Image (tube, rainbow, N blue to C red):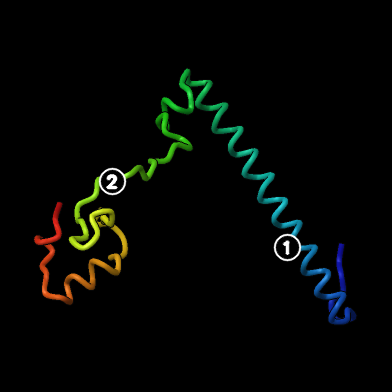
């Protein structure tokens, strides 16, 4: 299928480009699916499972979990900070007031 792009106006050319990119994306997806099927077939033919080859942690993520507080605001005992992430205002204000980090440790 030969298309003479010299005779296309701006809108027709953009439409052609969008259709071509869409088709290219579809072909890539199809190729990935076929490759994935080949890999699974090869693994199965050798007598292994996907998890045997690549580990059983596929899709699992480590949860952030909570971290015990490391610092406490001397002015308000309810305010604590784990020492991770951005410093809270009370922590910065205490440092500016002359306190040291070790003074704020729990």
| Residue at the image point whose x is 48% and y is 28% from the top | 50
Most extreme residue toward the top, as rendered?
47
Residue 94 location in percent, x, y?
A: 19, 70
Q: Earlier in the sequence, mark 2 or mark 1?
A: 1
34 or 95: which is nearer to us? 95
Within 10 Å of disc 1 (Cα), the crowding (few <14, some 14-19, many 20+) is few
Within 10 Å of disc 2 (Cα), the crowding (few <14, some 14-19, many 20+) is few
Residue linked to disc 1: 21
- Secondary element under disc 2, as helix, strand or loop, is loop
Q: Residue 84: name its quadrant.
A: bottom left
Q: Residue 76: name its quadrant.
A: bottom left
> Which quadrant of the rendered structure holds the N terminus?
bottom right
What's the mark number on residue 82?
none
Residue 82 location in percent, x, y?
A: 25, 53
Question: Which-is-in-front pick, marks 2 and 1?
Answer: 2
Left or right for 94, reference 7: left
Left or right for 23, reference 32: right
67 or 18: which is nearer to us? 67
Left or right for 74, reference 48: left
| Residue at the image point whose x is 53% and y is 27% from the top | 42
27 or 85: which is nearer to us? 85
93 or 38: which is nearer to us? 93
Q: Residue 35: name its quadrant.
A: top right
Asked if the residues shown at circle 2 and circle 1 are in contact, with their CB atoms under 8 angstroms apart, the answer is: no
Location of residue 89 with respect to 71 vertically, above or below: below
- Marks 2/1: CA–CA distance: 47 Å
Residue 31 location in percent, x, y?
A: 65, 45
| Residue at the image point whose x is 18% and y is 60% from the top | 74
| Residue at the image point whose x is 47% and y is 18% from the top | 47
- Secondary element under disc 1, as helix, strand or loop, is helix
What's the mark number on residue 67?
2
Left or right for 12, reference 80: right
């Amino acid at each position: 299928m030969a298309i003479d792009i010299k005779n296309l106006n701006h809108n027709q050319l953009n439409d052609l480009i969008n259709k071509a990119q869409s088709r290219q994306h579809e072909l890539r997806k199809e190729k990935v699916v076929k490759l994935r099927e080949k890999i699974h077939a090869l693994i199965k033919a050798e007598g292994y499972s996907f998890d045997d080859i690549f580990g059983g942690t596929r899709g699992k993520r480590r949860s952030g979990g909570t971290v015990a507080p490391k610092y406490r605001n001397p002015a308000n005992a309810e305010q604590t900070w784990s020492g991770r992430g951005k410093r809270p205002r009370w922590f910065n204000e205490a440092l500016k007031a002359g306190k040291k980090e070790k003074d704020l440790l729990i």
